[in-house]
Image: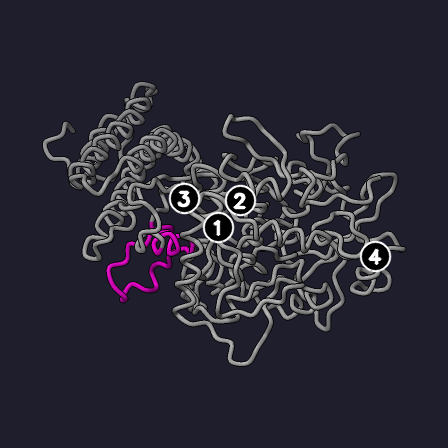
Amino acid sequence: MNKSFNLVTEPWIKVVDEDNRERTVSLEQLFTNAVHYRQLAGEMKSQDLALLRFLLAILTTVYSRYTADGEPYEWLKIDGQTMQPVPFEGKTFEDDDEDGLRQTWKDLYHAQHFTEIVTRYLQKYADRFDLLDADHPFYQATRAQYDSLVPKNKVVAKGKGTVAVKQINRTISESNNKPDIFSPNTSPHKNDLSLASLARWLITYQNFTAVTDKTKVVAKEKFPVSPGWLYGLNPVFATGSNLFETLMLNLVLIPQGVNSETESMDQHPAWEVPIEEYIQARLTGIVPGNLAELYTLWSRVIHIEWDNGRPLIFSAGLPKLNNHEAFLEPMTTWKFNKKDNEWQPNLRWLNSLGKAMWRNFGQYISVQQDDTQKDSQREPGIVTWLHMLRSTKMLPADLALHLTTVGLINDGNATSQSPAAEFADEMQINADVLFDPNPLKRLQWPKLIENTVEMTEKVGALVWYFANHIMELRGVKDDGAFANRVSARFYERLNQPFREWLAGLTNNDERDEKVNLWKQTAKQIAVQTADELLNSATPQDIRGRVKNADGDQHNIFTYYRIFRASVNKVLGIKGGKS
């Protein structure tokens, strides 16, 4: 059993380097050589997202205090021992201070590397990043701290409130009561885990947690336990051409969608706060007011005992935080709840698992024409941040932006919320197409793209109805199951062509011409899907059935003609064969 496993210097983060080789690196190596790594490469995409936010918490903390040159901002007083801001009378955050933060971002982006101040910070807090530290174990409580936070009958000595390694490992997510038949590990090795892997899963588990826990921290009032902050979002973030660019594009030094105040600019990642103080803050149920704390939220108080090199993990639930109107969070889409008159993250469910990202284009990119539509859409903070970077010319006009969504979907059971599926998707689009510098033209492409998506969805509905009519001809009542399968096949064929069409748009294009090209593609794929049904028609499909009291006879050919004509009408194609 090692007495130390320091994440600052020990390799534990999986990446893919520029030669497409998988490597495991330390925090120091990652921040020093980020431009030479293509991407994070953990066991799951959702793990990579949890680690990305952890890495961003470090960068946000450091560069909200220090410039790219390693000098404190003029509006701050920094304690040289703790590298933390010192409260002082008259401390305020002004518009000019935003300029300083923007300059730091610009200097880093043009330098194409992070600066020595990040390494200095990591070395200063090295003991907080030690997985096995006796006094400050990483993302954990000591035994004494854990015992002081849980009921007396749940202290470590009682041996209750444990979670198995195989439950924290989200590639397995197996409890002791329900074995995972399709586990990537055989039964004798489901609880095997290296220290590097344990560190990765510890961060991931805090973000995506089931709610089957029997142990909670002591509180004055009862509370529902948190399923993990990321579980309550529909995540969206930007992906760059390498890890440095990905980190930079998502490094929000000026919060979007909220007032920039001293509180929101003072970063307090979990490792800087004494655990007793941290838990008291979580018990209030108030969402953190700064990004570093938000990115490092705990859903559980974890304590690990070691038995012959194997971890025994004790877990105590913390309260669920209300994510409604939590506009500080930049990495989520939003929907307006008219009943409660408030915004909340637009979650993903199992029934939406196969729906591609582009089909919800309007959730990611603002297409509002004026303020009268304020309740119809709210842009993700990360998109607003990218817009600011482009409008201030800190991003090149021809930059291909990759908006990515990644996450876990729970099983829909309120009493378990165990992970049931992982989703991952992206769409690429030119920065100037999204953020035209001309305010009169800015919405032209986004609005046209959204209209094109809506038009395509109408074609998809026609495909569904055609398939459903075939089931009616056959006298089969399947609640639309067959039509759903046909519709899914239609969109599977459509996904890649639409992504390519979207990525190929430029601000110099003739917009109507580009939209017409897509109309032809959508029609071709829709007709191909319908033709396959026509070519496999049964005798009953051909004979047809009497549709109404007037004795009108409908068969697959009449429905097919109606379908072709309807597709042409929706797409606005005149003179097409019906």
Does residue 531 appear in the picture of this structure? Answer: yes
Label 3 amino acid? Leu
Magenta range: 362-388
**Picture coordinates of residue 236 (x, y %)?**
45, 48
Report the Cα–Cα distance between label 2 and label 1: 7 Å
Cα distance in 3D space between marks 3 and 4: 42 Å
Q: Is residue 257 magenta?
A: no
Say if mark 2 contacts mark 3, CB within 8 Å: no
Residue 449: image quadrant is top left
User: Is residue 517 placed above or below 245 in the rendered structure?
Assistant: above
Of 501 and 216, the residue lying toward us:
501
> Is 276 situated left or right of 338 in this image?
right
Where residue 392 sits, quadrant-wise, is bottom left
Q: Mark 4 falls on what kind of element?
A: helix
- Mark 3 and mark 1: span between their CA atoms? 13 Å
State the mark number for residue 234: 1
Amino acid type of the residue tagged 1 in the rendering: Asn
Labels 3 and 4: the sequence-earlier one: 4
**For the residue labelled by badge 1, is the local secondary structure a helix, a strand or a loop?**
loop
Labelled disc at residue 403: 3
| Residue at image mark 4 | 143
How many discs appear? Answer: 4
